[in-house]
Image (tube, rainbow, N blue to C red):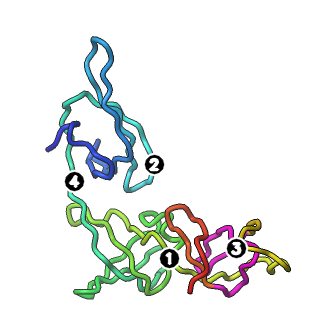
Amino acid sequence: MATTQDLRKGLTIKLEGELFTVIDFAHIKIGRGGAFVRIKIKNLHTGAVLERTLSAGENIETVKMREKEMQYIYQDGNLYYFMDQETYEQIPLSSELLGDVLKYLKENGVVNVLLADDKTVGVKMPNFCELKVVTTEPPLKGARASGGLKPATLETGAQVRVPLFINSGDVIKIDTRTNEYIERAK
């Protein structure tokens, strides 16, 4: 058990029976009144972002999170199967639990599966991934790197805006946190 003084960004807590990650927090003291803590938290199951106000010194339940590197191997209907690379154990995860990760998930790709109390609560993608452009408009003659952007569809179905000189079939590097084009893959 911890108190509101132990809060920090990225901490996983259990509140009202749900698991949350602390996005932001602020200790606030007003005049003669008591102090309180305003926290911004993200639900690990639904992805909803909430704001809560807690009394200063209030007890909160922290949850130990750990990451386990696993390989995505295949999809069967609504379930996506991941394999532990050490024990070869396979675990199925639903598309609801994966959420936005599905935009970048490629067969045989390695991801970090998030575990809380040995229960799978989500998947964390690497910050950057390389994906092939399946469809985009043909490049414009004389297009430069500093020109505009055009829409492109990647091999996983994700939509991203790319520079005008990118062709269908090119492999590009994407920032999975912002869904932005970084560079052509080498």
Which amino acid lies under the numbered mark 4 shown in the image of this protein? Val
As drawn, the label of residue 63 is: 4
Q: Amino acid at mark 2?
A: Ala
Magenta region: 151-170
Q: Residues within 10 Å of mark 3 (few under 14, many from 20)?
A: many
Residue at the image position 71 percent from the left and 72 percent from the top = 145
Marks 3, 4: nearer the viewer: 3
| Badge 2 or badge 3: first in the primary sequence | 2
- State the separation of the CA atoms marked 2 and 4: 18 Å
Q: What's the mark number on residue 152?
A: 3
> What is the CA distance from the residue labelled 1 to the residue labelled 2?
25 Å
Residue at mark 3 to residue at mark 1: CA–CA distance: 16 Å
Classify mark 2: helix, strand or loop: loop
Q: Nearer the viewer, mark 1 or mark 4?
A: 1
Please state if 131 lies on the left or on the right of 118 as rendered.
Answer: right
Residue 5 lies, with reference to residue 99, above or below; the image says above
Residue position for label 1? 129
Residue 90 is situated, as x and y percent measured from the top left of the image, at 31, 83
Q: Residue at x 29, y 82 (%)?
A: 84
Residue type marked 3: Ala
